[in-house]
Amino acid sequence: MGQQPITFVRQVVALCCFPELLDSPGFPDDAKQRAQRILQGCGGRSLGSYSASQGVECIRQDIAAYIQQRDQGVPADWDNVFLTTGASDGIMSILKLLVSGQGESRTGVMIPIPQYPLYSAAISELEAVQVNYYLDEDECWALDVRELQQRYQDAKQHCQPRVLCIINPGNPTGQVQDKKCIEEVLHFAYEENLFVMSDEVYQDNVYSPDCQFHSFKKVLYEMGPEYFNSVELASFHSTSKGYTGECGFRGGYMEVLNMDPEVKAQLVKMLSVRLCPPVSGQAAMDVIVNPPKPHEPSYAQFTKEKNLVLDALAQKAKMTEEILNSVPGIKCNPVQGAMYAFPQIFIPPRAIQEAQALSMAPDMLYCLRLLEETGICVVPGSGFGQREGTFHFRMTILPSTEKLKILLTKVKDFHLKFLQEYSAQETTQENQHRET
Amino acid sequence: MSILRDISPNVRNIRHSELLALGRQACGIKEKLKQGVRKPYKEVIDVSWGDPHRTGVKPLSFVRQVLAACLYPQLVNSDTLPVDVRQRAQRLLGACKGGSVGSYSPTRGIADIQHNVSKFISQRDGGVPSVPENIFLTSGSQVAIMHILNILVNSEGQPRTGVLTPVPGYSSANMALEGLGGAIVPYYLNEELCWELQIDELRRALQSAKGVCNPVALYVINPGNPTGHIQSRKSMEEVIQFVSQEKLFLLADEVYQDNVFGEGSEFVSYKRVLAEMGPPFSDTVELASFHSVSKGLMGECGLRGGYVELVNLDPNVMKYTFTLFSTDSGAAVTGQIALDLMVNPVQPGDPSYPLYNKETQHIRTMQVHNAKRVTEVLNSLPGFSCQPVKGGAFAFPRVHLPPRAIQKAKEEGMPPDHFYCSRLLEDTGLLVSPGCEHGQREGTHHIGFCIMTPVDILEEVLRRLARFHTQFMKDFSSTERLE
């Protein structure tokens, strides 16, 4: 999307790739030192050697140290850290591990609506039971624990709900859960003995000044030992988001908490089947959890680049929300975090009918028309799930500010035109109706 | 807390890996060595995996230079790197969305690379056409194998879906099958005939599956893993006739196709043989061929680059295949770049060619030398018999364990060749793979180790092995020895 990679990340991975560059004056010492540490942990000192299936040991240790620091001292054991091929690999693996039972005892997996469709795809593939819980659009996509409780009780009639998935910050919604909400969710999970999967890949993408990222693990710790030592939790992170945006590296990790040792052994066994995650992605993940420190040569440039990306994203988040909200028929919740706007769009009844006649979701029709008429590609809300009768689309806020402004203006123009096109004749019909 | 009983039965049914257990033992030893504990050796040598870099083989310079330039494009404009490296990196970056290796790539892979793979296949197969849309680039061939098995195996079905798999074979593929709830239908390769695949044995295996499971596919590895056997064209034609007759899907794992060095041995792809057999076979036999950057001359296991080419699949099945592959969010771009460099290598006349040629020649010579040396040394040791190694990355010699060793292993609760490998590791620091990991005929025992190693490392491997083996056989053959 035009976002520049972080120089330091690329330097370290390039050095790992072609260690002859360690002799080149063109690379800073802190990058070289990290590359050497990573290579020391690789078989034959090469990125080309299989790592252990859980990942390169020193990288796992670095990740544990990062988590501990991020969570202000909450202890992290590197033995609970697993490198993964993107967060998706970790999410799929945990779900694969946990889905069992038959008929009424088949594992139910609770997922937010709207959701990132990997979850529904995984549930479908594993033939688990999908248990939807709705985020509250009127409350800025907040998660209400009473909704969780209700859906859980309903689901118990036909399956065994055992897993609770949360995406925080949310995709596609961008909401950042507050600490109280996370506590309530964890309390609920504790009460009902649920395995919590917290997808935290957007933890570095928080824009709203009123919001703060709280890791599920930290909140759990602060709830006391009874919770911290019992609630099963898997937290996921990735190189794809944040300020690095390295999607193509397929880098990620998961940290598991309170997993029965025998179950953990099964997890390790299962992960070994896919051999290991790409070592270059593991290296990128290592740099993200171990960035330049203030006294290091690359610190200034690294910080500058990072802030440039995050500041721009925050700016774009605000701008997108504002412009979309200025359009009659579009309502956009504040983009508190992540990388998306997920506005609700009013689709006139005639357009809904036309979509039905074409056997497609109304927001799909909308998006196809938008694509054809403006070249702008967004994803219909039906792809993520939404309350019956509501329509949305998801767009990223990733293009440059200038491009985004132009894009949003085009969306605005399209929407007004769309409303007009599908309202006009209806108005005439209504008039006719009234006259008779 | 979730307990064992709550987790997926398919995951629980995945076999326990003896090699993983030995790996843990090796970690323990490495830790002790780091702490300064004295042992008869200074370091652990791990040749248990088909992982050349782990053993000390160097990556190809051109590959790493291009990768570095793709990762850090500032190198494209500096003259730190040769001009053909920079040109190739530029071309590859141009093929990536946004000119960056950090972008998600499409489900089938970066289009240019997908097309190059297709061209390579066609060229390799003497002009047999290859369609890019039937090719999926993946983060290693193992991911592709797992996806294709996922399509074939009905995880909750009764009876279970069966796949015929070779013994000895590739344990990760077997584990993948088990993880999906599939059943392994073993067919035994003939050790006395240099690990040949025999059709009668396939028939016997298929017959044995009756009433036990529903066999849907035949998995062949050519060149063999760990056997190194190279299939003859005639044998391949028989296999194709067999799968056609029995309506089995053919899974051809061909990742070692560039590791062929036996005199008179030549690799030909299943796709080519199938095409050249003509109709009805060429139009109907369903085939998935797998390849990877992990083996061959590159040995880039950690980059995770592989592909699968699908032949004669029903278009509706292809649709679902596409959806399944899309859940990966694309293959690792570094692996895809390595794939491009594998299928489109440096050519004579290119500035990097002399170095590239020197490095690849060195690896080829090393393979030939190692294969010969290993068979020579092992066959000179009483208690070992090693078939000639014609291809692949391993030696897989038979160890004729004395009854007392087998007894001791039973007492310690482990398979006899695991016991042998465990003692070998403890006494010499040498980690090899036990035959039970790959499967073998009942009552036989083997070890497997990588021969894609630098010549001097192989000498050290053989030295440690020979010394240990001689002592081990003495210890467990002697009748006077007290327990």
Image: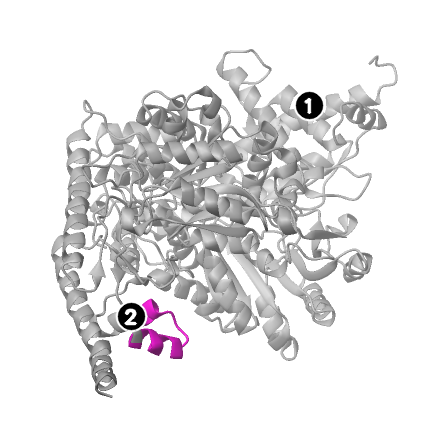
Is A354 contained in the magenta span?
yes
Residue A236 horizontal side relative to residue A265, left or right: left
Q: Which residues are magenta?
A: A350-365
| Residue A85 in view here | no
User: What type of secondary structure mainly makes up the magenta span?
Assistant: helix
Q: Are marks 1 and 2 in contact (CB under 8 Å)?
A: no
Residue B462 horizontal side relative to residue A71, left or right: right
Judged from this view, the residue extending furthest toward the front is A436
Is B8 contained in the magenta span?
no
Residue A320 horizontal side relative to residue A160, left or right: left
Q: Position of residue A226 (x, y in %)?
A: 48, 22
Q: Is residue A28 above or below residue B94?
A: above
The three-letter amino acid code for the residue at tag 1 is Arg
Q: Which residue is mark 1?
A: B423
Q: Position of residue B440 (x, y in %)?
A: 75, 43
Q: Nearer the viewer, residue A319 or B350?
A: A319
